[in-house]
Each structure stands twice: as structure tokens, then as C-alpha cells.
Image (cartoon, helix red, strand yellow):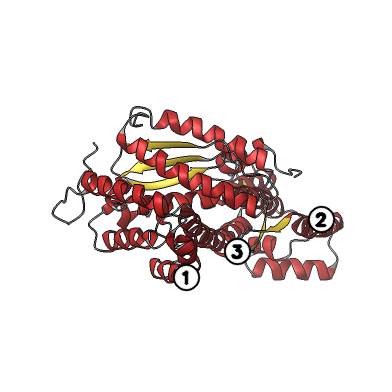
Amino acid sequence: MLSIVSPSAVRAVTTSSFQKIPSSPSSFLWRTFHASSSAHRKHFAIGGTPRRVRFNLAPEQQQQQQRSSLAGGGSHHYGQRKYPTYLYVGGGVVAIGGIGMYFHYQNFAPMTHRRRWIASSPEFEKEIGDENYQQLLQQYAGNILPKHHPATMAIEKIGGRIFQAAGEFAREYNLDYFDTKNVTFTVVDTDQANAFVLPGNHVFFLSGMFKYAQTEDEIGGILGHEMAHNLARHQGEKISTNAVVGILARLTLFLDPTGGYLLLFLPATQLLASLPNSRNQETEADNIGMYLAAKACYDPEALGRVFKRMDEAGSDGSDKNLALKPPEFLSTHPSDDTRIKNMQKWLPRDNKIFHQDEGERCRSLRRQIEVGNKIFQAATNISGPDGLPQRHGWM
Ligand SMILES: [Zn+2]
């Protein structure tokens, strides 16, 4: 797919595109005002004495000027701003082009058929994902568990089964962009409970998550959710939205260099575009993720149990990280209640896959998973005073 977004454009959006915006709008306004009043003094006060200046104005213009000064002078700058005709024509062309582009780049998410907009290419998303992956490896250096560590081996085993199910999903929905061969699993030793995925199939699992995900089935639910983000190219949606928001933000500054429009524009896009998009994507990742887990012979009900535990620990304050700042995995913009209710709705579909052929399809794998569940529980069941494992036995 043709890409309209260049890597530098997106990096600019995510890092420096707003640096030219004054850090404090009020200080910017103050500087503007200060500069104009200095100029005013230069023109109208020579040798410290204000000098009266006469202009040749028509009588109605003089009346207008008087009304304006009585009304408080400076404010007319905002009320009577007139833009040149070429701006209106240019704005029209941009608007028509924008509508055309919207329809050209809109498509539908797999399985849920949600209408969405992606202008980036899968190759470009992978490029960004690979770059972030290298940065994170450096950031977490020293805390990354080695390949032969039991926790890494468990995540790779479960992740491998989920990845295989994701490959089947990609073939089922003709998702040519999904790389069915390459995947990485990185386990980071930290108290933080989180998991996330980058384009290019780079999955990160933060070991604090073992507090809440205590069986292979539950880990399968989490990794299914993460893999679903990539199957549905959610990062591509975010990159595309950010690029458009960056362009429009610059346009508002062009129309109103004081940054007034921008102050309205940024919260409005958050409220009307970014947050609802994020909620939809999380719901979609739960939906596809449960389906993947069931396909990989993991209990589709397990993900709901993880949410319940995390929700309880966040609301009763026993995990301060969760109470203060929900991680990406728990970015519950749909509330946990809604999330669990949604899962109940999808459960009959996923149970059918889980118990396919009267359980025959998963029978031998289930035996292995049951053994894995016991090993997991033994490793994670070191209860602290709150009833949750303080530190899992692998560490
Ligand atoms: Zn997510």
C-alpha cells in the first residue's frame, strides 16, 4: 500500500513537532503584546514625550476608530480578522483532498469489520517497530531474562502456540501483511505488571504480570490480546492519526499564530478521536485475542480472570502502580466491567472452538497445558499479606 507518511514526519509528530509551540501560551501572548507596545512607544513617543499623530481618515472611518478604542482597543485584532481569498480557496482544496484521502485509505479490521483509517504501509510500521525494539532492548538491558530462564522458556512456549494460531487467523482473513515467520518474546524482570507488542511482532512481557496471570491459560489470554493488536494493525492506525493531527495542528498555528485555536484543537482531537479509537482497539484486541487463545487450546475464560484480579488490585490500592497509572495492557478505556461483559458475549463462540470435536482437537495439547499450569502455579504461588504472590518463585 502506498504510504503518505514518511518516517521523519511521524518522528516529528511524536517528538518535536510541537516544540515550536510556546511552552506557555500566556508567555507567548505576553511577548507578542510586549513587542507591539515597544514598537508603539518607538513610533509615538520621541524623547519621552508622546506625540499626537493625525491620519487622513474618512469621517465614518474616524467614527469606527473611536468606537474601536472605546470598546477596548486591542481586542479588535481577534474579532475582525480577515483572511485573504487564496486562503479560503486553499482551505477548500485541502478539505476536498482530505475527504478523498479519507475514503481512499479507509478499510475494515479483520473479524470485527470495524471501519478504520490507515495511511501508513505495513513495511513502514515494521520499520518503526524494529527501531523501537532496539531502543527498548537498550533501555531494559540488565533486566532482560536470558533465553534459558524458565520464565522466558514458558513465555516462548505459550507465545509460540499463540503465534501459530495468529498465522492461521491471518490465512483465514487473507492478511498478507502479517509476518507468520518472525516473532520475538522478551521477558523483563520488574515489579511492573504489563505486556505490550510492537509492529514486527516484538512482544514484551514484564514479570510483575505473573502476579495476576498465574497459569498458562491466563498467559495465553494476555499474549492472544497482544498478538491481536498486530493482526489488526492497530499501530498503523495510531501512526496515521498522529500524522494527520500533526498536520492539522500546524494548520491551526498558521491560521492563529497565538496558539488559541491549537489550545482548543488538541483536547478536542483527544476527546473525539484518540480516546475512542484507543477504546475500540482494546475491545477489538480482547475479541480477537480470546479467539486466538481458544484456537491455541487455551481456556478462553482465562483472560477475564486476569482482568478481574488486576481490577481488584487497582481499586483496593494493593498495587499502587495499577491504581495510579493503568499500564497499556490494562488501558481500560472501556471499563473493566464492560470488558468482562464483552468477553461473556464472545465466550460461546470461543468455547465452541476450545471444545471442538468434543474436545478431541485439543485433547493432547490440554494434557501438556495442565502440567504447565501446575508448574506455573507452583512458581507463582508465594502469597504475600494481600493474598497475591509477592514475588514469583522463578526469581
Ligand atoms: Zn492492549
Query: What crowding class fits label 1: few (fewer than 14 Cα within 10 Å), some (14-19), or many (20 or more)?
Result: few
- Expressed as whole percent of the image width and height from the top left, the position of residue 40 reads 66, 48
If you read the primary sequence from the N terminus, does the residue marked by circle 3 or circle 2 appear first?
2
The image's mark for residue 348 is 1
Q: The residue under label 3 is which amino acid type?
A: Thr
Secondary structure type for disc 1: helix
Residue 48 is drawn in which quadrant?
top right
Q: Position of residue 395 (x, y in %)?
A: 23, 36
Residue 217 visible from this viewpoint: yes
Viewer-side residue, 32 vs 114: 114
Q: State whether residue 166 is above or below residue 260.
A: above
Left-right relation of 154 to 379: right
Sequence-earlier tag: 2 or 1: 2
What residue do we see at 79% from left, 59% from top? 95
Residue 112's disc number: 3
Residue positioned 64% across, 70% down in the render:
71
Q: Which residue is mark 2?
A: 97
